[in-house]
Image (spheres, rainbow, N blue to C red):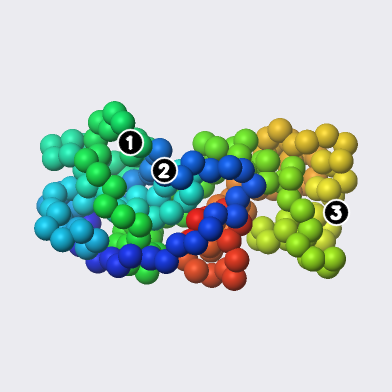
Amino acid sequence: MSRFNSNRGNYGRNSDNFTPRKFEEYAYILDYIQNGKSSLVRMREGVIIHAIGEEHLTLLELLGINNEKFSIGERVYIGKDGREKIISVLGRLDYNHISQSAKNELPTVIEKIVNVNEKRFIDYFNSAQPMTPRVHSLELIPGIGKTYMKSILEERDKRNFDSFIDLQERTGLREASKLIAKRIYDEISGETRMNIFVRK
């Protein structure tokens, strides 16, 4: 595992299509080091964890409880009350300052989050609206051009999609969870001009 090096990132307003809680309740572990030093909080040492929040999809540095076992991709509770494995949330991280191991795990863990929270992300297909007269927000998803957009809009006018499989069967759009995950990764890594899923 690599030693962590991080700075505080810059974060703005969330632009998701739902009302979010202010703080993350759960996070997924991307990388950890048993005897590490926080790069966000001076004098904090121990099990330093890089993770991604489940709701706002922000990168976080956590302090884990010594002698607990952690695994990559594990979902841990980081809410205010009743934490079992996490001592504290040390702060938010910028993509460029998470470990290389965390960067390597990020695509897989993002896709896991998308699949676990399928309803939340399928709702994007049900509620996405035009951004301008020429560009629809559905087209911000990799792989969705005018043809798929038209099909999605026609089908959702009949009834809402209830799963990724339903979306595929009715529109032909394959592996929608992977396309959503790719968009989230691009937002986290700074490859997009605007965010639709990630609190920046």
Identified at 46% across, 45% down, the residue is 22
- The residue under label 3 is 150
Q: Residue at x 82, y 41 (%)?
A: 156
Q: Is residue 122 left or right of residue 74?
A: right
| Residue linked to disc 1 | 80
Quarter of the image with the N terminus in it: bottom left
Q: Nearer the viewer, residue 123 or 19?
A: 19
Q: In the orientation shown, which residue stands out farthest toward the top? A: 82
As helix, strand or loop, the secondary structure at mark 1 comes to loop
Give the mark nearer the N terminus: 2 vs 1. Answer: 2
CA distance for labels 2 and 1: 9 Å
Residue 89's x, y, as percent?
Answer: 29, 47
- Give residue 11's position: percent from left, percent from top: 45, 62
Mark 2 or mark 1, whichever is nearer to me = 1
List x then y, in percent, for residue 67. 13, 37
Q: Which residue is mark 2?
A: 24
Apparent side of residue 91 relative to residue 176 in the rendered image (left or right):
left
Residue at x 15%, y 61% (from the top left corner): 42
- Above or below — where is 55 with respect to 42? above
Instruction: Specify the label residue 16 is tagged with.
Output: none
Q: Secondary structure at mark 2?
A: loop
Q: Secondary structure at mark 3?
A: helix
Give the quarter of the image for residue 54.
top left
Amino acid type of the residue that numbered disc 3 sits on in the rendered structure: Lys
